[in-house]
Amino acid sequence: MTKKKLTLVMMDAPFENARTVTGLRLIDAAVRRGHDVTVFAYEGAVALTFARQAPHANAVHGRDAAQEDHPLPKDWIASLMEDAPRHGGRLEWINCGLCVDERGVGEAIPGAKRGSPADLWKAAEASDNTLVIGTR
Amino acid sequence: MESYLLFESQEPLECAQVPRHYALAAGLKKEGNRVTLFLVQNGVAAARRSLRSDALSQLIDAGVEVLADDFSLRERGMSALRLTAGVKVATIAEALDQFAEGRKALWL
Amino acid sequence: MKTLQIVTAAYRCNIEEQDDPVLWISQAMKAGGADLHLLLEGQAVDYAAKGQEASGLSFGGKKQTQPPRIEDDLKRLVATGAQVFALDEDVAARGLERADLIEGIKGVSRADLARLFAGYNQIWRW
């Protein structure tokens, strides 16, 4: 399989829409194929890498926090970043800086970078393809 | 001839725009392009054999490849046996491969 | 790389952002030299209408001093040389006439979308 450079744009905030998981599934598939992936997180999606996401228990289902093992997007993304080199590729995550500031989510997981629209265009120009998953 | 990968995450009863998305797929195909419509999330609901799946049948007859995401189908308890004829079950990796091959990719 | 940016949602978070996020990022990339053009589709065709006015909101004593000015944003994009299209059928369906739209907006019909798309390397549908 030929290694490709791919750019994805995500916009949805965590826990709000299934588009987030579909986006992460596409990224996961790209990582497993060994592609180089750049994600530009715009608007609410900049909170996907917010370091202060925290798991919780689930009293409705009678599970404590450990049992609930609530997924946190930041952990999924960190894991994808860690996994990418094992498959011969890399995952670069860029958060739109102004979007980060207005949402107060500046504390991001290690590896998530701050960027601007210029970074999106630069990544897209250097990529074989770009997919924008817009919000609705 | 160009190639297109269209992601459809909504179904016609949920969103009035969906028929227009299907029309876009048909229009692109009519111009001689290769077109795949990848149904994902609630978009797969339109593929269950019913009155509303006629629109997908028409796309298939016109030569559009209609794929339904296997996870989205399973999440909704949708058996492949109940899908309208011609809709193929596919993995997200297959969609990714089409995207990686350079198809113009649109999230509808 | 020549791209077509398709704007579909409208007035989603414009007051909080003081901008439409897709028009904003398009202007930012354009200012950096990007070869991009726009298509307004669905409810976003309303962005081409003259007379949009979103000023005057306040919450408690906190007034909004810089409301979104979508009309100005589109005019700026047109002035940069970006082609800004609006889907004819969506314009008509919303009771808009040509005279209601700002200068420089080009019409395109649904039937011509495939041919329009062929002129771009990538289509980014927001």
Image (tube, rainbow, N blue to C red):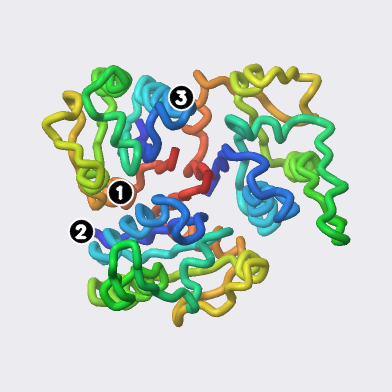
Look at 37% across and 61% down and name the residue there.
Answer: A5
Quarter holding residue A58: bottom left
Q: Which mark is residue B20?
A: 3
Q: Are marks 1 and 2 on the same chain?
A: no
Look at 43% across and 64% down and name the residue there.
Answer: A38
Q: CA distance from mark 1 to mark 3?
A: 26 Å
Q: How many marks?
A: 3
Left or right: where does residue C63 sit relative to residue A85? right
Left or right: where does residue C72 sit relative to residue A119? right
Which x, y percent locates residue C41?
59, 31
Q: Secondary structure at mark 2?
A: loop
Look at 32% across and 32% down and name the residue there.
Answer: B35
Q: Chain for mark 2?
A: A
Residue type (three-letter) at the residue carrying disc 3: Arg
**Label 2: which residue?**
A1
Residue type (three-letter) at the residue carrying disc 2: Met
A99 relative to A83, above or below = above
A128 relative to A35, above or below = above
Q: Secondary structure at mark 3?
A: helix
Extreme left residue here? B81
**Label 1: which residue?**
B101
Q: Chain for mark 3?
A: B
Q: Secondary structure at mark 1?
A: loop
Residue type (three-letter) at the residue carrying disc 1: Glu
Left or right: where does residue A90 sit relative to residue C100? left
| The one of C85 and C41 positioned closer to us in this rendering | C41
User: If you read the primary sequence from the N terminus, does the residue marked by circle 1 or circle 3 appear first?
Assistant: 3
Which x, y percent locates residue A43?
58, 59
Look at 66% across and 49% down and name the residue there.
Answer: C13
Label 3 packing within 10 angstroms: few (<14), some (14-19), many (20+): some
